[in-house]
Image (cartoon, grey):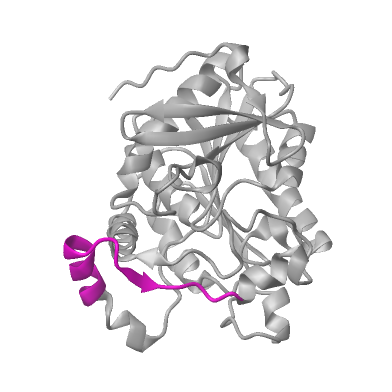
Amino acid sequence: MITTITTSREQWTPDTALAGFETRSINLRSGRAVLIRQINPPNQGRAVLYVHGYSDYFFQAHLADVFRAHGYAFYAIDLPGHGRAIETGQIPCFYRDITEFYPFLDAAINLIDAEQQQPWLVLHGHSAGGLITALYAAEGQQRERIGALVLNSPFFDFFIDRVTRASIPLVMWLGRIQPTRVVGKLSPVYGESIYRGAGGEWEFDQRWKPVQGIPMRAGTARAVLLAQRRLRRGLGIRCPILIAHSARSAWPIAGSPEVGRADVVLDVAHMRRDGPSLGDDVTMIAIDGGLHDLALSPPPVREHYFREMMAWLAEVAARQPVT
């Protein structure tokens, strides 16, 4: 599928959710996504496209600042059914196959290429966005345009107990016959730990990223499980890959000190287990004290993460032609 969208500056409008950014819709027959960019992006031959996680949207302005300081034009996308792209009457965060998102990533990359004259492109995914971008880097129409893939705590497996894991065949069955049935809810512990209104550091829109999370439907769980199975068979991604994650995981127990210094959403052991299956050039780093979204970790921790990520990108860019 070839996706073409026009690129006139008039189509960008100020972002109503985040100061210093602007947005434009990507409208396809299958739905709508929203592309976000930092205003007046540098044009130095480098760009990054960030993809958010499940029950999530782009709000991490400081992440864009880090990339901008290193000469990158920063773009992010709110996928269909997420954040700025949620439509009236739409089930949030519902999809039945991750390939549903591929045409929107195609369109975003085409637009970035047009604006930035085919830059050296970093595809950057967090959590479920890490799973989606990993599969896209292996299968997507524009996979050859990706110079590097950066995954922040990618969703390679569910962090569940043995009893819940035993129910996966049932979930797979429900995903086929009752795809909109709710089969899981997120613990509010992580959301409360990072949200300013509950004592955390960060402000974000509760309509789009409620602290209690958005319930997962059977069809979406099935789509994620099938994507994870494909990943474990090996993806053969050709570009260099960075997988960054916390040094440890912990169960989301309210009041536990681990909530502020570990991943309480996913199991980092799954990331270490499955990371090598992505391709031949995989670097993995563990960030001590990192939260699930490493970019939202306490200041010294996230600064360490940013230094590691940008140093890796500088090394990778040095061995690839950057126009």
Specify whether residue 237 is painted magenta.
Answer: no
Determine which quarter of the picture holds residue 177. bottom left
Identify which residue is drawn at 46% across, 38% down: 239
Q: Position of residue 163 (x, y in %)?
A: 34, 88
For the residue pair 145 and 97, the one nearer the viewer reads as: 97
Residue stretch in magenta = 169-188
Location of residue 116 in the rendering, given as x and y in whole percent from the top left corner: 60, 17
Above or below — where is 123 with respect to 107? below
Toward the front, the furthest residue is 89
Q: Going by the image, does 31 lie left or right of 254?
A: left
**Image label count:** 0
Work out whether residue 311 can be spotted.
no
- Judge by depth and name the residue closer to the eye, 190 or 63: 190
User: Vertically, is 206 above or below 288?
Assistant: above
Quarter occupied by residue 247? bottom right
| Quarter occupied by the C terminus | top right
Quarter occupied by the N terminus: top left
Q: Is residue 155 left or right of residue 63?
A: left
Determine the residue positioned at 73% across, 63% down.
Answer: 297
Q: Position of residue 119 (x, y in %)?
A: 58, 21
Quick one: 13 or 3, which is closer to the camera?
13
Residue 55 location in percent, x, y? 51, 58
Left or right? Give the position of 94 relative to 154. Answer: left
The answer to whether any part of residue 72 appears in the image is yes
Compared to 80, does 26 lie above or below? above
**Residue at point 37%, 54% (across, down):** 94
Determine if the magenta segment contains residue 185.
Answer: yes
